[in-house]
Image (spheres, helix red, strand yellow):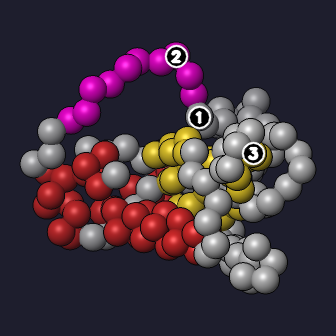
């Protein structure tokens, strides 16, 4: 993900199929927080949920992290087939965070740009008289990690 961050990618999405293992969520969250703390950015993590019909169980626990902080987290275990996790993020905060790390700025200046696909889509609300309600950025939260006995 570092290469993408150096090229200016602000949002990284990871659709995962990581099976449940005791204490694995703690490791996942450490990796996600560490990746976004080192290079800044918004990290969208989604994991499969349920049983594969055999011996594997996927525990879900989708989350959203921004610059090293988890701002939204789904449940680790649940009976619902689908769980939607959302957060309101400010991409200018990501750009400022990256700009404050001098070594990251230096490395980014020599990074090759990624392949781009133009899309007619806007992630931002329109500014001005016709603008809807101002959205509040989702604050950091303390991630919920089950005790070993609960897992």
* Residue 1 shows in this picture: yes
* Residue 45 shows in this picture: no
- Calculate the distance from the C-alpha at mark 1 to the C-alpha at mark 2: 10 Å
The circle drawn on residue 120 is 2
Q: Depth-wise, is mark 3 or mark 1 nearer the camera?
A: 3
Q: Position of residue 29 (x, y in %)?
A: 55, 68
State the residue in front, 62 or 51: 51
Question: What secondary structure predominates along the stretch shown in magenta?
Answer: loop
State the residue in front, 121 or 74: 74
Q: Is residue 3 above or below residue 81?
A: below
Q: Residue placed at 49% from the left, 63% from the top?
A: 32
- Calculate the distance from the C-alpha at mark 2 to the C-alpha at mark 3: 37 Å
Left or right: residue 39 versus residue 136 is: left
Circle 1 residue: 123
Q: Is residue 117 above or below residue 4?
A: above
Circle 3 residue: 51
């Amino acid at each position: 993900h570092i290469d993408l961050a150096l090229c200016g990618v602000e949002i990284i999405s990871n659709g995962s199929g990581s099976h449940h293992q005791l204490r694995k969520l703690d490791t996942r969250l450490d990796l996600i927080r560490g990746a976004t703390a080192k290079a800044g950015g918004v990290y969208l993590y989604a994991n499969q949920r349920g049983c594969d019909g055999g011996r594997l169980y996927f525990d879900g626990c989708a989350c959203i992290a921004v610059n090293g902080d988890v701002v939204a987290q789904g449940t680790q275990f649940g009976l619902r087939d689908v769980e939607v996790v959302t957060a309101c993020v400010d991409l200018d905060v990501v750009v400022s965070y990256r700009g404050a790390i001098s070594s990251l700025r230096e490395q980014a200046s020599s990074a090759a740009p990624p392949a781009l696909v133009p899309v007619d889509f806007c992630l931002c609300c329109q500014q001005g008289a016709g603008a809807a309600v101002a959205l509040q950025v989702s604050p950091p939260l303390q991630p919920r990690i089950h005790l070993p006995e609960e897992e």
